[in-house]
Image (cartoon, helix red, strand yellow):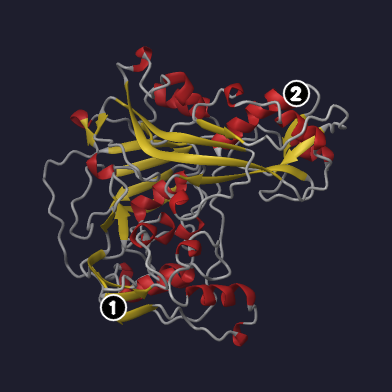
């Protein structure tokens, strides 16, 4: 066991894993609704075919919105799915699948009229393979699915203020005998007709529409879960501007533009290739030689190499590259596992010596080590274990920490599990500036770094606008000079 743990070291490469996830086991009647009829998309005869390749710093692990735990996954899903609302570049909610919104005088009841001219992507999960209209019942079903025991709680945390939602959530996750459950649905989410869904809150919430814009609350047809042999985690169906095409043998994800994109103005990009990398150096090498057109979020090493402290390109790169610094942050926090069975006096004594200036990584670094005491007599361990993470910024910080506080006397080593155990001393948590508005991370961290999200792209691409939405890709505003972009690799 000891040798295997040493093998899982801090430079453990990332892998793109499409991890299978559970689906609801309840029997559910599928909404029977009219499929799309003949709708011809008007295109110009001389339209230039555009494709781009995107480089990602996180692995895309799942195509199910409820399992979208990192920003790279959320970025890809934002091209496939839509929610009731989206966020504009200033971070304000704007209608997506919603056509009209009515709010009661007491600010508790939201009545949403769904745009019935929106269609799900064509798929074999539908009769004859033709995508059907979005139904108000899809909204209720997708929101209620977030409460079920076989999915992560991340999305449901945004919905606890809906009347009846917490009760439904607690029963789903604590009453394991399905026949003993009392609640069949969430009382505060009502389908009034095919195009109208009404949501009642317990208390007024001025941020409710922003919460509905979360990528964890994208809307999908229930057939994608209950009538999908490959599962929604591998075969996503949404209403977004791109449809899922395939995952290639090298892990590259291929998306193609939705040719019947719901009567919404389509982006100019016809096909998108998305690739995640096990190291920043490999990502930057492929970007520098033109194999990657756009890095939506650069990691710490690329930022340090290519930009100044004000996030402007260094002179050597200004002729070939372009940069956009967004008004959004990725947040990484690090915690001492107080339930660990390991004597951590030496560990805390070493951490107490650190200052923000010790770290090379660029970002806002906060240290809360004033409660750590120096103990010269503390016994050192050969290895201190931490819970595994594939977040590239967390891994960079932990690599620095390994050099700053542990070497040469000791080592900081990844344990082979993502959650803290009695063997682990340190664990990390990831969030975003968007998520912090509604569900802040626990404030008992000893180290936190807020890293600005910065996009790097070649000079053939324009229109990438700064945004406050951490997962936004601005795909609709992109323009390509002379239609000249690199081909898929």
Of residues 188 and 154, the one nearer the viewer is: 188
The image quarter in which residue 206 lies: bottom left
Where does residue 129 sit, x and y in percent of width and height? 32, 68
Label 2: few (<14), some or many (≥20) within 10 Å? few
Please identify the quarter of the rendering in which residue 461 is found. Answer: top left
Task: Kindly tell me whether residue 230 is visible in this rendering.
Answer: no
Task: Say above or below: 429 vs 461.
Answer: below
Position in image of residue 390 (x %, y %): 59, 41
Q: Do the numbered discs 1 and 2 sit on residues whose CB atoms are within 8 Å?
A: no
Q: Residues within 10 Å of mark 1 (few under 14, many from 20)?
A: few
Please state, as top left, top right, bottom left or bottom right, where the C terminus lies in the image.
Answer: top left
Q: Marks 1 and 2, how far apart in space?
A: 64 Å
Residue visible at 41% across and 21% down?
307
Q: Is residue 198 above or below residue 383?
A: below
Of labels 1 and 2, earlier in sequence is: 1
Closer to the eye: label 1 or 2 = 2
Local secondary structure at mark 1: loop
Residue lying at 79% horizontally and 28% vertically, measured from the top left: 410
Q: Residue at x 27, y 78 (%)?
A: 194
Q: Is residue 67 left or right of residue 201?
A: right
């Amino acid at each position: 066991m000891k040798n295997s743990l040493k093998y899982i070291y801090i430079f453990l490469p990332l892998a793109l894993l499409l991890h299978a996830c559970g689906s609801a086991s309840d029997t559910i009647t599928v909404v029977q609704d009219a499929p799309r009829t003949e709708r011809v998309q008007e295109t110009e005869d001389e339209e230039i075919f555009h494709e781009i390749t995107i480089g990602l710093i996180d692995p895309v692990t799942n195509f199910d919105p409820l399992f979208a735990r990192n920003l790279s996954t959320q970025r890809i899903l934002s091209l496939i799915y839509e929610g009731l609302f989206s966020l504009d570049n200033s971070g304000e909610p704007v209608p997506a699948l919603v056509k009209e919104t009515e709010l009661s005088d007491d600010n508790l009841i939201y009545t949403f009229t769904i745009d019935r001219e929106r269609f799900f992507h064509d798929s074999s999960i539908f009769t004859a393979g033709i995508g059907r209209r979005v139904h108000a019942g899809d909204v209720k079903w997708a929101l209620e699915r977030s409460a079920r025991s076989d999915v992560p709680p991340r999305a449901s945390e945004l919905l606890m203020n809906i009347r009846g939602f917490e009760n439904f959530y607690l029963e789903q996750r604590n009453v394991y005998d399905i026949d003993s459950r009392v609640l069949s649905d969430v009382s505060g989410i009502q389908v009034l007709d095919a195009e109208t869904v009404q949501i009642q809150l317990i208390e007024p919430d001025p941020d409710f529409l922003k919460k509905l814009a979360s990528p964890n609350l994208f809307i999908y047809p229930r057939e994608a879960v209950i009538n999908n042999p490959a599962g929604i985690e591998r075969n996503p169906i949404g209403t977004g501007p791109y449809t899922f095409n395939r995952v290639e043998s090298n892990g590259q994800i291929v998306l193609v533009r939705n040719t019947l994109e719901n009567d919404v103005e389509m982006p100019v990009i016809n096909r998108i290739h998305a690739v995640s990398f096990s190291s920043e150096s490999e990502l930057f090498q492929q970007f520098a030689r033109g194999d990657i057109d756009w890095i939506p979020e650069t990691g710490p090493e690329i930022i340090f190499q290519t930009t100044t402290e004000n996030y402007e390109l260094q002179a050597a790169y200004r002729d070939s590259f372009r940069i956009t610094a967004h008004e959004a942050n990725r947040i990484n926090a690090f915690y001492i596992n107080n339930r660990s069975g390991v004597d951590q006096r030496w560990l805390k004594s070493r951490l107490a010596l650190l200052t923000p200036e010790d770290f090379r990584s660029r970002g806002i670094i906060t240290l809360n080590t004033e409660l750590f005491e120096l103990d010269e007599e503390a016994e050192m361990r050969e290895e201190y274990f931490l819970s595994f993470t594939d977040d590239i910024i967390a891994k960079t910080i932990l690599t620095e920490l390994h050099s700053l506080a542990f070497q040469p006397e000791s080592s900081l080593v990844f344990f082979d599990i993502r959650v803290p155990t009695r063997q682990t001393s340190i664990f990390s948590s990831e969030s975003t500036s968007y998520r912090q508005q509604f569900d802040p991370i626990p404030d008992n961290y000893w180290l936190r770094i807020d890293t600005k999200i910065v996009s790097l792209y070649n000079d053939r691409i324009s229109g990438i606008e700064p945004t406050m939405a951490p997962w936004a890709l601005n795909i609709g505003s992109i323009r390509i000079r002379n239609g000249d972009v690199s081909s898929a690799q």
